[in-house]
Amino acid sequence: MEKSRNKDPKVTIKIPRPLYNNLKEIIAGSGFDSATDFIVYVLRDIISHELYRGKESLSAGEIDIIRKRLKALGYFS
Amino acid sequence: MPSDRKVLVIGLDCATPQLVFDRWKEKLPNLKKLIDGGSYGLLESTIPPITVPAWMSMMTSKDPGTLGFYGFRNRKNYSYDEMFFATSTVVKEKTVWDILSEQGKKSIVVGVPPAYPPKPLNGNLLSCFLTPGPESDYTYPKELKSEIVTNCGGYIFDVMNFRTDDKEKLLRDIDELAENRFGVTKYLMQNKEWDFCMFVEMGVDRIHHGYWKYFDKEHVLYEPNSKYENAIQDFYIKIDQMIGELLSVAGDDTIVLVVSDHGAKRMDGGLCFNEWLMQEGYLTLKQKPEGRTQVKHDNIDWSKTKAWGSGGYYGRLFMNVKGREPNGIIPKEDYEKVRSELVEKLEALTDMQGKVMGTRAYRPEEIYSTVNNIAPDLIVLFGDLYWRSVGTVGFGSIHTLENDTGPDDANHAQHGIFIMYDPRGQQKKGKLEGTNIMDVGPTILNLFGIEPPRDMRGKIVK
């Protein structure tokens, strides 16, 4: 369950304590400062890959703009 | 490395060792401090030495063959006209910041090409000069865009009208570009958590191409006593001042690298690649061109064509092979024979005075550890890169002093710069030899105490 306050940019999400403890073990010695940092990174990664999936190919209009710019820059004639 | 150390990489696209290390070093106090107090040297670029793939080769420690893209435009298949652009989506190898993200390190990445569309990382990223426009989603995370617009007045991708004779406006645009890029990077360094920060400034490349002939007395179009004689020098001084500001923000905990993807040199002219191929009987057009015109694929008589080329800062040669191209005529068993013949003839090319130019034609499989996707059959660097490749025909000669894409004074050079500076002095100092662009990635990981993945091809610079 989530608790959120309208103006607070962060929300609290509850996860099972054994899972939390396991995460703490996994990140020990890594560059992650806390289990929260690790969870935020993993969730962002999942979500952004989903969002990114739709952008894997550029639209014809976008390609045309880039092609013209590169030509103008002299990268090809 | 102790956990309190950070790494800042300042990428200056096209920054040139002869200018930074020698000619103007005394006028660049911040770069001088890094050079004299750290290690420095030439950085050998990719073949071809061009923005894409060079920056990604640096950040993945993979050669262009492994990356599977050889320039901005690449053949999608063996048809004559289907190409794909090397956007961020074609980069399949892990970058330094991908690896740092997995280790929990936070990164700021600004404008490292190709970076559009922006890919996720543990940190903040802005795309590069290959972004279609300000309406595009050019940041990761997406909401960073509005923050940049609010606090930095937006993000400038590039100078938009580069091929211009309005040199006054171009100078102002290049200044504005640099101020914006440095400003955005400084804002992010001051307002975001980071362990690793890298940004690429494109203005250095643009000013070389636009103003080289005004200071280089050996340039064929040198204009003495021009008001733009000091344009490039002044820009380096400006960049140096802005580097100083970033160093102040970075502080003494941060190890600093200043790198470029390639260098620059004067451009002596253009070699009309397709004109030469026609002259040598490798390329036949259906209709003789009236005046200067680009070679359209539908005007090529493929039944009489063995090879065609394309223009740019380097040449790409494609061969018309039977069973490979739709109307190929070179039998597969003759492929290497014809290719060797072309290499020999290209490397024997002479300049307008009849002197051998020093052209090199490279077979991809000889210079890359593997060749993914479709590489050109030959990658050609004309006249030791003092000459660019001109794809247009109708010049009536294989040499031209004019550029078919508009005014351009400089070409790319094979070596860029590498500077590494640890404010705490915990490094070897002095001039480095034999540093390769693929060494940068593993060197950065090593600074974080991370063992570089075994498939990284570069070595660690210590």
Image (tube, coloured by chain):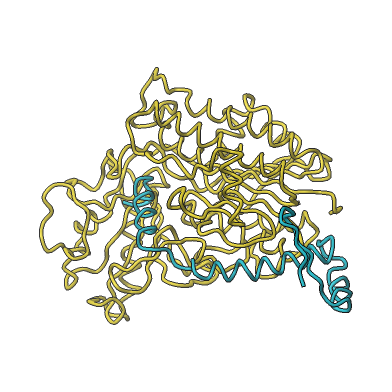
State the residue lying farthest toward the top: B225
Position of residue B326 measured from the top left corner of the image (x, y, whole percent) = 25, 77
Q: Residue B30, relative to residue B275: is it above or below?
A: above
Q: Quadrant of residue B277?
A: bottom left
**Residue at the (30%, 73%) spot, across then down:** B79
- In terms of depth relative to the viewer, which is nearer, B317 or B406? B406
> What residue sits 66% from the left and 67% below the top?
A45
Expressed as whole percent of the image width and height from the top left, the position of residue B117 reads 51, 59
- Apparent side of residue B54 relative to residue B250 in the rendered image (left or right): left
Q: Does residue B74 sit above or below B132 in this rendering?
A: below
Q: Which chain is cyan?
A: A
- Residue B430: percent from left, percent from top: 73, 40
Colour-to-chain, yellow: B
Say left or right for B140 vs B429: left
Give the residue at the far front of this rendering.
A6
Q: Nearer the viewer, residue B125 or B304?
A: B125
In which quadrant of the rendered view does residue B441 lie? bottom right
Where B81 sits versus B6, above or below?
Answer: below
The quadrant in which the N terminus of chain B is found is bottom right
Q: Is residue B12 left or right of residue B298?
A: right
> Is B102 or B455 nearer to us in this picture?
B102
Total marks shown come to 0
Q: Position of residue B10 (x, y in %)?
A: 64, 43
